[in-house]
Image: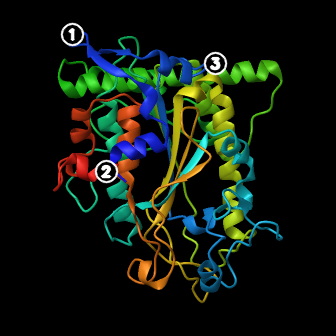
Amino acid sequence: MNRREFIRHVGLAGSGAVLLPIGLSGCAVVASDATLQAAGKGDRAPRMVVVFMRGAVDGLSVVVPHGDQEYYRARPTIAVARPGQVNGAIDLDGYFGLHPALHPLMPYWRGGKLAFVHASGSPDGSRSHFEAQDYMETGTPGQHSTRDGWMNRLLGYLPRSEQTPLQALTLGEATPRIMSGRQVVANMPSGRTAARPGMIDQPRVSQAFAALYGGDDALAMAFRDGLAARRELLAEINSQEQQMANNGAPLPTGLSLDTARLGRLMRGDARIRLGFLAVGGWDTHINQGNGAGQLAARLAPLANGLATLAQELGPAFDDTVIVVMSEFGRTFRENGNGGTDHGHGNAMWLLGGGLRGGKIHGQWPGLDQRALNEGRDLAITTDFRRVLSALAEKHMRVSDGALADIFPRYASGAGGRDAIFI
C-alpha cells in the first residue's frame, strides 16, 4: 500500500487543503468547499493529540483476530473470547473484534470516527522499552543521535500565532522526548494539582529568573515564551474549572480528569494545535488476563478517558485526530506466567471527526508460523511513520517538503519517498 492509498483509505485525501505563504510570519490555510463541508461544525483549526501507551500494550488483545483459530491455539488461557461468549470481543467486521473493556469507544466506531491500523509499528527490532519509545518519539528508528521529537518539529511548520506561544501542551511535569526541541511547549501537571501554582510562579522566584533571562538572546526569548505559555495555561485551567464549579458539575477522576481538562482547553482556544499525554502500565508479563483481569482493568479507564476527551472537545472534535500508539506489541504466544513478553507488531488507534473510520486499515500478515516475525511476533506491514506522515500532510496541512524534516530519515530513505510512504 503506497502513501496515497493510505490517505484515501483513512479518508484524508478529500481535504483539499493548500498552504499559501503570506510573508515570513506564517501562512494562510485555503481549503476547498469539500473540506468545509466534511469538517462539519468544527472551527477549522486542525489539531492532533497523541496518547502514548508506555510499556507495550498487547495489540492482539486490543483488536482481536477472533476469526483465526491460530490465535486461540497460541493463547489457551489469555485469548479474548469470541463475540457472544462471556467477556468476549465486540465484533467489528467478522474477523476482528474489540476488547470488551473498550466498549465506551464503540459509538465512535459505529459513527465512522474510530479506526485501527493493525500490524503497524517501528521497523527497528529493539525489544527495549527505553530504546523503542525513544525511536518512536523522535521519529527516527535506530538513530540515537536525534535531539528533538517529531511533534516539536511538526509544531515548527504550523502557522504561528502572534497572540500566544501556547500552541502545544503536554500532560506531566517534564517535557517528553516527542515534544522536546526548539519550539515552545507548555507542561500541564496531571491530576488535581494541575491548577496549583509552582515555584516559578512565586513573585520572588519569577523576578529572579526574569533578571537572569532579560536579554535578547535565543535562550532568554525561549524562557520568556515558555513562562508566558505557562501563565496563560494556568489562567485557562482555573477559568475552566471555575465555570465547572459554578455549574455544579463534579470533576471526573483518574485519566478522565486530565483528558476532560485537555479537551476543554483545546475546545476553548483554537490556537492550541498539539497535545500529548502518556499512560503507563502495559508491560503485562504476568497475569495479563483475557476479556477480564489486569489488562481489562487498565483498558477500561483508558477508553473512558478517550471518550471524555472526544466529548469535551465538543465541535473541535471534528477537526481533531487522536492517535494512540505504543512502542511495540507483545509475543503472539502466551508465556508460562499467564502473560506475554516483548514483541513487535501492534495496532495504532485513530479517533477523530475527519477520519474514514469503522475500518481496520493496513495489510494483515496472518498468524501462521511462516508469517510471524522471528517466529514469535505479529509482523509489521505498516511503518508507524507512514500513518503519522499522512496525518501531518493531509490533516495538519504541512507541505510535502516539511515531511522531510519532520521524519527525516524516513522521507529521504532508499527507494524514494513515493516508494516508502503509504
Instruction: Determine whether label 1 and label 2 are within 8 Å by CB.
Output: no
Quadrant containing the N terminus in the rendered view: bottom left
Name the residue beneath numbered marker 2: 139
Name the residue beneath numbered marker 1: 23
Name the residue beneath numbered marker 3: 239
Considering depth in this image, is 175 or 2 the residue closer to the camera?
2
Question: Which tag, 1 or 2, sits closer to the chain's start?
Answer: 1
Task: Indicate the amino acid at tag 2.
Answer: Gly
Instruction: Determine whether label 3 and label 2 are within 8 Å by CB.
Output: no
Task: Indicate the amino acid at tag 3.
Answer: Ser
Residue 208 appears anywhere in the view: no
Answer left or right for 330 relative to 336: left
Residue 336: x, y in percent? 60, 89
C-alpha separation, residue under disc 1 versus residue under disc 3: 35 Å
Crowdedness near tag 3: few (<14), some (14–19) or many (≥20) residues, C-alpha within 10 Å: few
Residue 272: x, y in percent? 47, 24
- Residue 307, disc: none
